[in-house]
Amino acid sequence: MSTDPDARSTGVTPVYLHATDPRAAGLIADLADVYGTLYGPGAHDEMTRYPVDLFDPPHGAFMVLMRDGTAVAGGAFMPHSAGTAEFKRIWTHADHRRQGLSRQVLAELEAEAVRRGYVRVFLTTGPRQPEAIALYRSSGYTALFDVDADPEQIGLHSFEKLIGTPSPDQPLLPITPPTFPH
């Protein structure tokens, strides 16, 4: 069930499935095409860096927003460190942009991460995705980089957000942002 009150108005339904489910194939192909255009041949390595079972329950999730039987947006998370989920592949298909769907994906994934016991989210996006950077900043994520620096010099843009209260018995580990080849 969606946690977003606007889900019915946009005609989408969140569906949790396995990352290799055929219903997600078109959405993933669109993401891979855009990554390839933005970042070149190395984008394929990013798309295949993580085994798909990392996105399976109980510690991970892979979700798509379905409209009329088609996956129009989606995203996933996997465990990062104790209490921290790492969000990946937040994406809206090119034919369905400018409808607030990525914001719905983000809200749905955050709610699911809380249900799974996570208290913090970590995520990254590339320097050539200003829409994603703006989405995360406007959704309460803290930039782990100098927001005034040249995006290309920063490389990967890392963000974090508390979505719950950390346990005093298990403090959250500091996040070391990954590097990105320039």
Image: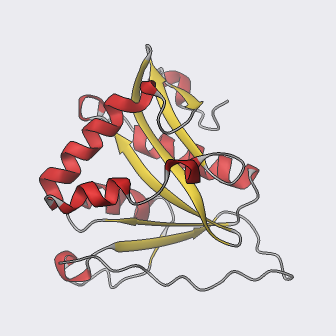
Q: State whether residue 148 is above or below residue 137.
A: below
Q: Position of residue 168 (x, y in %)?
A: 84, 82
Q: State whether residue 47 is above or below residue 92.
A: below
Q: Say whether residue 82 is left or right of residue 126.
A: right
Q: State whether residue 65 is above or below residue 28.
A: above
Q: Say whether residue 150 is left or right of residue 4.
A: left
Residue drawn 22% across and 52% down?
35
Residue drawn 28% across and 65% down?
126
Q: The C terminus appears in which quarter of the rendering?
A: bottom left
The colour mode here is: secondary structure
Q: State whether residue 149 is above or below residue 88.
A: below
Residue drawn 66% across and 48% down?
111
Q: Say whether residue 95 is left or right of residue 143.
A: left
Q: Position of residue 108 (x, y in %)?
A: 58, 43
Which residue is most to the right? Answer: 169
Nearer to us in this view, 12 or 21: 21
Nearer to us in this view, 69 or 9: 69
Residue drawn 43% across and 80% down?
177
